[in-house]
Image: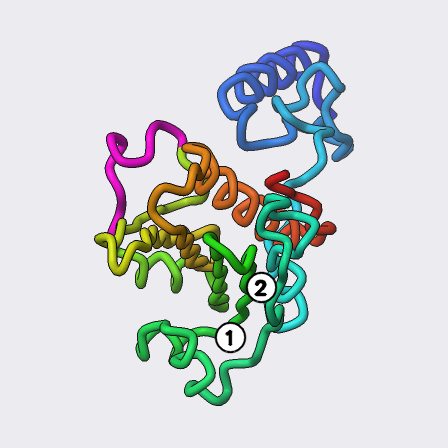
Amino acid sequence: MMDGYGRVGTATACLVLTLLIIPLSSGCSSGGGQRSSPSSKPAGEGKPSPQPVVVLYTKALERALPNQYSIPSDLGEQRVRKAWETADPTICQSETWPRRWCAKAVAVGSVGFTNSVDQELSVRLLSFPASKTADALFTSKLTVDEIGNNPPGDEIAGIEVPSKQGWMEKIINVRQGGVIAQIKYTWREGVGVPSTRIMSIIKMIVDRIKQVQRGGAPIASAR
């Protein structure tokens, strides 16, 4: 059995160790194996752990797709909204995705919207089994001058297609975790499309993907 001096020395050493390793440990324990007092708990203890990110297979990917209630009201006519497995890669390739992307994906989905006059929107989603898989495939990026600071998503890239037969088109690819989305907005020249329209749609789609990845309901809207 330790004497009084031994106990003081042990307590002092424990306090020093606790201060040094507090970010990594729950603190020193006494000879009885009890946890340290609340005052020596590491920063952040007691906060809820971050929710695991789930892989968006077919049903979950379809939920992440925008619907007629989440896009601007002047694009209210919705086309087919559906997701498919990628066991048959021809479906994925028919949605304009690169063949090598389709070979590694687990699900593909798409939806379209139009006002039947002068504006159209198509959204395609491609889901992968891990974020690192999508990250390795997503190599091109836009500059800050093109998209501004703090753009939505983990990575973003895109092009503006030259005017063709009086129609303008902008295509944006954005990655959020293990999902890559392609947003294509087409409008007739001279139509007053708000300058923030496309970016607000992209942000909505990214938010919906994140909400489903966290196990929640996709409630994000661009209205």
Say whether residue 153 is left or right of residue 204. Answer: left
Q: Earlier in the sequence, mark 1 or mark 2?
A: 2
What segment is highlighted magenta in the picture? 140-150
Say whether residue 27 is left or right of residue 200. Answer: right
Q: Is residue 143 magenta?
A: yes
Q: In the image, what residue type sits under mark 2? A: Val
Label 1 to label 2: alpha-carbon separation: 9 Å
Quarter assignment of residue 32: top right
Q: In the image, what residue type sits under mark 1? A: Val
Of 191 and 197, nearer the camera is: 191
Estimate the x, y position of residue 46 in percent, counting from the top left. 73, 29
Q: Is residue 221 above or below residue 177?
A: above
- Kindly identify which residue carries mark 1: 106
- Kindly identify which residue carries mark 2: 55
Of 5 and 73, nearer the camera is: 73
Q: Is residue 155 magenta?
A: no
Q: Quadrant of the N terminus?
A: top right
Q: Are marks 1 and 2 in contact (CB under 8 Å)?
A: yes
Identify the secondary structure beneath mark 1. Answer: loop
Q: How many C-alpha atoms fall within 10 Å of the one at disc 1: few (<14), some, or many (≥20)?
A: many
Estimate the x, y position of residue 176 in percent, counting from the top left. 47, 51
Identify the secondary structure beneath mark 2. Answer: loop
